[in-house]
Image (tube, coloured by chain):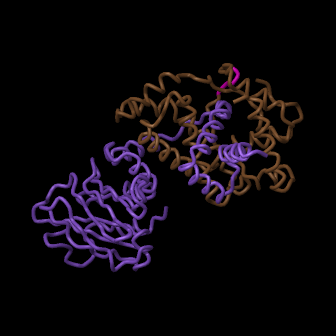
Amino acid sequence: MTERDEIDVLAGEYVLGTLDAEERAAANVRRGRDPVLNAAIEAWEHRLAPLAQTVPSVTPPEKVRLMLEEALVKIPAAQAGASVVALQRRAQGWRRVALAASALAACLLVAIVVGERRRSEPAGSYVAVFQKDDASPAFLLTVDLDKRQLSVQRVAAEPQSAKSYQLWIASKKIGDAPRSLGLIEAKDASTQRTLATYDRATVEEATFGISLEPAGGSPTGRPTGPALHAKLIKTPR
Amino acid sequence: MQAPAAGSPVQSARLALIEPASTTAGTVIVLLQRVAARDREAFSALYAATSAKLYGIIVRIVKRREIADEILQEVYVQIWERAGQFDAAKGSPITWMVAIARNRALDEVRRKKAVSIEDTPEALDVASDEACPLDRVERSQQLLRLSQCLEALDNNRRDVVLLAYREGMSRQALGQRFSRPPATIKSWLRRSLLQLRDCLGQ
């Protein structure tokens, strides 16, 4: 086979769905940096698209539309673009829990997205978006994995009188309980923290949380209020 | 479009066009453009117009309704986020959306142990919307063209293509279906794909 045949067969099997898990994952990565393969995949999507007309439509349950409506509210506005797309995907498992817990979470900041590599950023840079349960991002968190440096930008979060925002990290690798990363000062637009005491793999897989606590921080050393964080940590995705 | 040769062992691989090919391609393009501008009403309209199509495709592949529900939601979140990336010059909006849905569904079934229908008899407990398919047939030039090229393949080689695309069957599952080792299936797929590509002349 020619080189073009090889690429077309790979792309064709990708579109048919017959690549096994590893081949498929490899093709997913490769198409991101190989325009020839990506074009070959799009060509097969186009060639085989008429087959989609032969699959019967099925009306989805109403609950999907309702959950979607809720989910969209939580998606931050467009400015963050593609990186947020990736984040939202990763956040799905999270969001389901968050939706279920939203009544509990009334005054707590819910939401948070587990860090995922931004395509446009240097390798090692991660970002997470913290949303209020009603609108745009409250905080934006970025982590430089190489330097293990964390930065939190306050976006739409309002300072709360007699309350403090507290930042947490949680990972199975450091036990089940979230650990405090300190308070986020309401007067500062940006807060820096070092994560030097955590190894790279731990930071990479960690879930970060922000809770609204009594002024000065949680009196117990754990997030007070709804037990949202603990549940969320265990939501695999 | 006629069904493949009588006696084909794969009844589910019959091709029947059960929906108008491009009900509203132009409308969908406009809706996508408005969705890209974060128009929630346009998004609702887009969902109403296309969700049954995408859900039908997803359910076929993942077999389980509860999983299909989650995937459908994720797919529309992606559509909401990526609407601005859709390029009408490159193809139809439905093709673009179908690709997102199929990719997400295939990622799911390939990542997990394949779901066997025998293991989940409730899996196909899904009523489709095709009340009277023949009434709704509308010829699609592209489907006719593709069908002619598929007809030119040997029966088994055509059926593996259809079962993979429509049912999301893996090489292993296809191997069991046709009592052949996966390597043989891979070789069938390879030849089918190259022959299809050359037949379609694209």
In the image: residue B142, left or right of residue A194: right
Q: Give residue A201's quadrant in the image.
A: bottom left
Question: Residue A224's spot in the image, x, y percent?
Answer: 25, 71
Q: Residue at x 16, y 69 (%)?
A: A214
Residue B163: within the magenta?
A: no
In the image: residue A21, left or right of residue A201: right
Question: Residue A127's spot in the image, x, y percent?
Answer: 35, 59
> Which of the pair A119/B68 is nearer the observer?
A119
Farthest left residue in view: A161
Chain A is shown in which shade?
Answer: purple
Question: Residue A125's spot in the image, x, y percent?
Answer: 38, 62
Segment colored magenta = B131-135
> Which of the pair B7/B39 is nearer the observer?
B39
State whether the magenta stretch is mostly helix, strand or loop: helix
Where B148 falls versus B82 (above or below)?
above
Give the chain letter for brown: B
Where A150 falls versus B163 (above or below)?
below
Q: Residue at x 63, y 37 (%)?
A: A45
